[in-house]
Image (cartoon, rainbow, N blue to C red):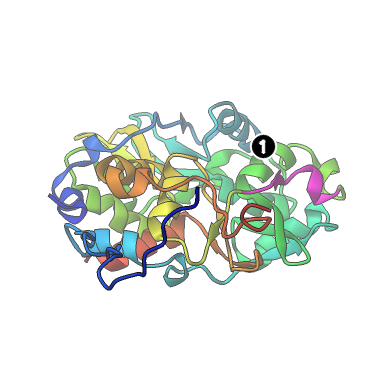
Amino acid sequence: MGLREDIMNETVSELPLRRALTVHAELSINQACELMRENKLGCVFVVDEQDRPLGKFTERQVLKLVCDCVSLDEPVGSRMVPIPESGCVRMADPVVKVLEGMQQTRLRFLCVVDGEGKVVALTGQKGLMEYFTEHFPRQIKVQMMSSKMHMNTREGA
Amino acid sequence: MGRKRNPVEPGDFEDPLSNYDPPAYADELERVLCATEVSQMPIRPLAYIEKDATVQDALDTMCKYECSCVVVEDAGRAVGIFSARDVLNKVAHDPATRPMPITEFMTPDPRTVYATDCPAKALNLMAIGGFRHIPVLDVNDKVVGMLGPRRTTEFLQEHLI
């Protein structure tokens, strides 16, 4: 079975998923940034009382706020970005939906929700790349990690 | 005692490609990943700053071009990269960092790929090495492009459907 077929048939549950960081809207941006730093993640999802996603706040937003000299004491809810429908996927969705979602929404992180719409995990570019590598071992894993186009000295010199 | 030298006859040398089996790919996506070049991926435009720039210069460049990573160059060669993750981890909580040299905050000596490498190599670096942004070099080691998450997914999707 080829890679293309795998992507079409296998589900999001088979992707390497990460624990999603969820916060409430009233948390300050500074605290959200601290949470992202501690967990080495570039995204938090802002959720309601039922853990359903209201929006996301990413390192991209941090960059914009820093450029605009906005105070990071503001509540994260005031600067979050709404998540479009294609920004959420379910465990049973095919892997290709993640790829399409990332492309359509131009998001790097997608929210994985359960049947009730609650945030259960996070996936995105890194998970997708890991999936590719796992499912494409012969050609990808054998690639050297470093590039060197030519030798520094002549052969035997 | 010297080796005996016989005149070379036709057929003395075996064609090195006589047993060569060209690689077989299960589908078009596999072929594209292994048999094409990084230069065929969307690697431009490229945002860069010089190595004597400040953190503020980097922030301005990233905001101006709406990109999440800039290459720090020295005479066209990549000496580092500075990304939105660096802003989150090193700059956001401390405004005093902004006039400081970018070289103190960038990730030095970034992993790179050549424009002539296959896309599978870039994917390998991203997945196994965990690098999200990879500068692309030409044969003279000059930076000619940048690969990031968005561009990679764009490329994959283009060849998937």
Quarter of the image where one finds residue B136: bottom right
Would you place residue B117 above or below residue A26 in this image? Answer: below
Q: Residue furthest top?
A: A38
Q: Which residues are magenta?
A: B101-110
> Which residue does the image show at 29% across and 71% down from the upper left?
B9
Q: Is residue A85 visible?
A: no
Going 46% across and 46% down the picture, which residue do you hit? A144
Check disc 1 and report its element: helix, strand or loop: helix
Residue B67 position by quadrant: bottom right
Q: Position of residue B158 (x, y in %)?
A: 30, 68
- Residue, x 36% and y 41% (percent of image)? A130
- Seen from the viewer's position, the closer of residues B105 and B56 is B105
Residue A117: x percent and y percent? 26, 37
Q: Is residue A57 above or below residue B135?
A: above
- From the viewer's perspective, tell me whether residue A79 is left or right of residue B38: right
Q: Type of residue at label 1? A: Asn
Is residue B102 rendered magenta in the image?
A: yes
